[in-house]
Image: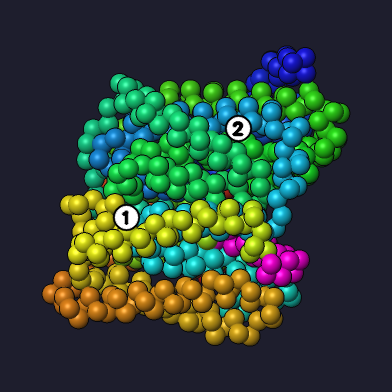
Amino acid sequence: MDNALAALSELFEPLRLFALIMGVLAGMVFGMLPGLGGVAAVSIMLPFIFLFDSYAGLALLLGAISVVYTSDTITSVLLGAPGSPASAPTAIEGHAMARRGEAATALGLGFLASMTGGLIGAMTLALAIPVAGPIVLALGTPELLMFALIGLYFASSMIGRDLAVGLAAGCLGLLIGTIGPAPAAANFRFTFGQAYLLDGLSLTIVALGLFAVPEIISMLSGGGGISSKRQVVSNWSSGFVEFWKSRWLIIRSAFIGTFGGFVPAVGANASTWVAYGHAMSSTKDKSRFGKGEPRGVAAAEGANNATVISDLVPTLLFSVPGGPAAAIFLGALFSFGFFPGPRMVTEEPVLLYLIVWSVALASIVGAAICFAITPLVAQLTRIRFALIAAPLMLVMVAGAYQATQSLGDISILLLLGVIGWIMKQAEWPRAPVLVGFVLATPVEQYFWLTTQIHGWSWLGRPGVLLIASFIIVPLIWRAASRWIAKRKAISPLSVSADADPDVSKPTGTTAARLAMSVIAVAIFGYALAEAMGFRANARLLPLLAIIPGLALAIFVVVREGIRLTRNVDQFHFEAKADYPIIALLIGYALGIALFGFQVATAVFLIFVLTRFAGLRLLGALAYATILFVGINGLFSLMRIAPPEGYLISNLF
């Protein structure tokens, strides 16, 4: 208690409190910008920590880390573009709520759940540091591998009612995650001779391409605002009511997230989906999940904010950062002369409690600020979307380009955006692809170490069997439900996932469903041929993704082909109005490649603002000028130069 009070006194020094608040504001701003998030916020704030003493400098970073998952709720709910990959469940459920006029409810629930998760994470951090070491060390690589697979399974099976499609999407994500160097062999995989791919793909680009770009395409073609209903935010009762209904779920999700933070390399991306899966499994009526279920928002936000704080446990105890932001924080600790390890508990107790107080206070302040600005941001859903899409697209390009500062970043962003759009139209869940991509590296590392150390005897370890039961039991339950349904002469699809009785599975197929299944077969088939030329250790994970992925994709192709032959009259091309928007974005990317960011962006802004936003030329020029200055300022802040086009760089 003496150390805790001493740390609180140290934190409430005016300069340190100021640094914490500045960190909170920076974290909120960058959390709301898709593609930037916590890593960008902490990276940009890093040079400023040396303007303060050690405690104030660390408080600055902690303020930014603690609120990113609180503020990215705004982007996830209003735009359907997750500010960070761990907020994908919030984007799925919260954005659906916003589109039916419940943005304020989703935002209020998300802010409160994030604050609760942050406080539980801080409390757990204070209690766990002395005892977490033995627990973390007791987990072997087999158990860590199973935790990663649990996260992938929940993401694959909990979105949509088609298990085959969900698992195929998860395998596709694992396969994409293997692009680049193999950690266990001297091999570069699936690089197509491009130096750009030697380091693999950026998580930021994959997240933006799969989720944000398809939403921009659909909303630009549809016109109007995000929601057709006026958002009422003067009465917060609905958000508080949903929060109170889900209070125990939020607490359980926060503890799930806390445990996920303890495990290095798993983090928020897996634990958020485990919490989301828990929310679904603990709900009697599952039909609303994927269509705007508040419990999905509550579970995701409670888990991800707790995870990012508990990421600091392995960072402080073992110098093993639980995530990218924690890695930057670790570097800051070293810079100030603090050396994390078990002895830090006895040597620097005041510092540890200062970290606890900082994240707790930042969580409260961040939620309060979000509540204060919600009446303004919720009204963005009534503004013509083209006015928002223009700056949003620029921020996404900047966020993608910062990864490697290559034009390949923008090309891959667009390619994944088109694939994400096809998946959306085909009702293939995109979240499993993202989660599979995130977990590819830890799964490969844990799988290789596990097989090298234990052979295949690890499958009989008690911990592995216990964790695997979370996958096996739901599969057995699903199979038993189908068998019972057959016995009763009822269609299995009507009861397999507690589907909404008013929504039945389509009997025919569409162009997008057929195209996506063929694309999946082509990708897995090519990858299989390519993987045969890798070294044995380099093809371990690719084959783990390819073999089941190819089998599932072939099954889906055959199924869609049968549906086509039986119901030819139902075959159609979806969302034809979206095609010109896709062509526009392709043209924008080509313009950047040929003429550079400045010229292509000027033309893109004027066209979008006059054609889609309905502005007159003078108003479009004024708005475009503001956006142009702002995006160039963002590039300067990130200390990178905008991309130059091939023609411009060669002519001048």
Would residue 93 be visible to someone looking at this image?
Answer: yes
User: Which numbered disc covers residue 121?
Assistant: 2
* Secondary element type, mark 1: loop
Q: Which residues are magenta?
A: 437-457
Q: Residue at x 71, y 70 (%)?
A: 455
Q: Position of residue 164 (x, y in %)?
A: 39, 67
* Residue 589 drawn in magenta: no
Q: Residue at x 24, y 64 (%)?
A: 487
Q: Looking at the image, is 8 positioned above or below residue 420?
A: above
Would residue 595 be visible to someone looking at this image?
Answer: no
Mark 2 or 1, closer to the camera:
1
Point out the tag, 2 or 1, that comes first from the N-terminus. 2
Q: Which residue is mark 1?
A: 497
Q: Position of residue 39 (x, y in %)?
A: 62, 45
Rendered-image quadrant of the C terminus: bottom right
Q: Nearer the viewer, residue 352 or 597?
A: 352
Q: Is residue 21 left or right of residue 226?
A: right
* Residue 439 drawn in magenta: yes
* Secondary element type, mark 2: helix
Q: Position of residue 616 (x, y in %)?
A: 26, 45
Label 1 is placed on what type of residue?
Ala
Label 2 is placed on what type of residue?
Gly
Q: Looking at the image, is 361 positioned above or below residue 282?
A: above
